[in-house]
Image (cartoon, rainbow, N blue to C red):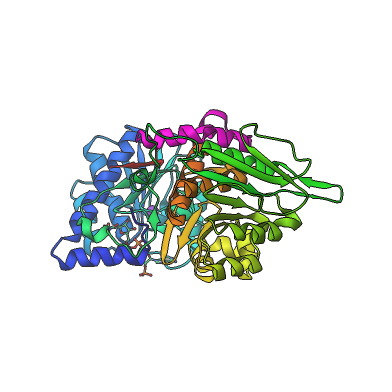
Amino acid sequence: MRLFTPEAMREADRKAAEMGYPSLLLMEWAGMKAARVYRELFGHRPAVVLAGKGNNGGDGLVLARHLLLEGVAVRVYAAEGQEGDALLARGALEAHGLDLRPLEEAAWGPGEVLVDALFGTGLRGPLEGLYAGLVDRVNASGLPVLSLDLPSGLPFSPHVRATATVAFAALKTPHLLVREACGRLFLAEIGLPRHLLEREDLPEVATPEALLPLLPRRPLTAHKGSVGRVGVLGGFRGEGLRYAGAPVLAALGAYRMGAGLVHLAVPEGTPLEPLEAVFHPVPGPTLPAMRVEALAVGMGGGPWGREWALKALEAQLPTVLDADALHPEVLEAYRRAGVRAVLTPHAGEAGRLLGKSPEEIAQDPLASARALAEATGQAVVLKGNPTVVAEGGRLSVNPTGNPALATGGTGDVLAGAIAALLAAGLAPFEAARLGVYLHGLAGDLLAEEKGVGLLAREVAEALPRAREALARNQAPLSLTRM
Ligand SMILES: NC(=O)C1=CN([C@@H]2O[C@H](COP(=O)(O)OP(=O)(O)OC[C@H]3O[C@@H](n4cnc5c(N)ncnc54)[C@H](OP(=O)(O)O)[C@@H]3O)[C@@H](O)[C@H]2O)[C@H](O)CC1
Ligand SMILES: [K+]
């Protein structure tokens, strides 16, 4: 599934029209499907529809007609000045005898549901004046809000904070970049010819269907040496300071993702955990002899991070470079040596590498991940909400994960998990996409049970359940398709 920009969506609409597909049919389906979502979520609760003058408003007018026909009480406040399909939708609604009121008079009361059909993909700048005020009132109303296509105002502020959003035809960038504004996400097919949605040049949304075929299968003859062995190199011990937990968590992540054996090179004095690992206590960064197929390097490395990564390079193995290993000199050395790596920075680390602030990185994670992938020639996992994976010209946006994962050590678990997938033979981009998806899904499964307050080791422990959910096709995209 591809993630569309408003421009790409308009292009698909335009091509459909050129091919003879009437755009009014798209609007009719959009409004009808949105009405279906409305009824599913809110039954017969009375609706207040806020409709702009563009086609998003047109979708709202179609929805109003369908709700009316199903016996739902509907009041519509609409902007003036509809044209084309939206004007036809207005006529069709008025033909049923409904009296449209001006938007300036918009009002609502307890028990009603607001339908936000003010603006969709046609918005060109932040809302001001009447519309900004309306959005503020909607958000302050305390009523449920169903947004059509996009919460109005996105990708700018102010914008509607919806209870649920019905995206038409495809997910668009703001659906994943400003996920919290959308509430529960529905994706409605509205009749666009399928091939217009198959755009290899657009970023991918990592779906269960795309990832399932990547999941390493385990034959009956499997043994611990045949399913992928991982070396974890990390930790720091200095003046009164010790980072000991991070490499241990990476080792747990690797085992829970299915590694057959994990070797752990850590500073002397590090607790010997997990018991299942092979330990190499070392006085400082070094590459001990170990038979492994992939490495995870840098977790908790502190001032040793750079050195750990340069030692690890001698193994010439696919390597996850995390945290303190993400150093310009290291990346240059890996590039020169032609060693494939997966880099796993958060916005701060990516910002340091690209000479930007963390805010600038988070502002456009797709462009940032792509830039870092291009600059280093490696696969990049830019951690955040959402996490974006980039390699070469390819981009993948991850839909799993939640704020409960924002806790110390979850990144270390992720690094180990991706290394396990590299060791199992997956290419860096594939290991990164699958690892990120399952790590997020593990967090989602746990958050459902426990809410906030997760421990990173619990996320590692939930990885097998996430794997199982994907293998059994029970992995929710937290997206309802219709
Ligand atoms: N394939 C599909 O997904 C389909 C989607 N549909 C729906 O159509 C909208 C997009 O419709 P469009 O008419 O292009 O745009 P909007 O309705 O979102 O808004 C257009 C109006 O907004 C005005 N505008 C733009 N920026 C601002 C601003 N900053 N402040 C105030 N007003 C603004 C603009 O007015 P102008 O006079 O400035 O041009 C437009 O009037 C999509 O999201 C779907 O909901 C189709 O129904 C079917 C196919
Ligand atoms: K909207």
Seen at 57% across and 60% down, the residue is: 362
Q: Can you say which quadrant of the picture contains the C terminus?
A: top left
> Which of these two is toward me, 411 or 32?
411
Of all residues, the one furthest to the left in this rendering is 20
Q: Can residue 409 be seen in this view?
A: no
Q: At which x and y percent is residue 136? A: 52, 52
Q: Can residue 348 be seen in this view?
A: yes
Is 450 within the magenta?
Answer: yes
> Which of these two is toward me, 434 or 186?
434
Ligand 1 falls in quadrant: bottom left
Q: At which x and y percent is residue 169? A: 29, 53
Of all residues, the one furthest to the right in this rendering is 240
Q: Quadrant location of residue 315? A: bottom right
> Considering only vertical position in the picture, is 233 above or below 83?
above
For this view, does 179 lie left or right of residue 98? right
Q: Principal SS element in the magenta part?
A: helix
Seen at 48% across and 50% down, the residue is: 422
> Considering only vertical position in the picture, is 68 above or below 330?
above
Is 248 within the magenta?
Answer: no
The magenta stretch is 445-474
Q: At which x and y percent is residue 224? A: 50, 36
> Considering only vertical position in the picture, is 475 above or below 328?
above
Seen at 47% across and 32% down, the residue is: 465
For this view, does 121 lie left or right of residue 312? left
The number of discs equals: 0
Q: At which x and y percent is residue 273? A: 68, 35
Seen at 18% across and 55% down, the residue is: 25
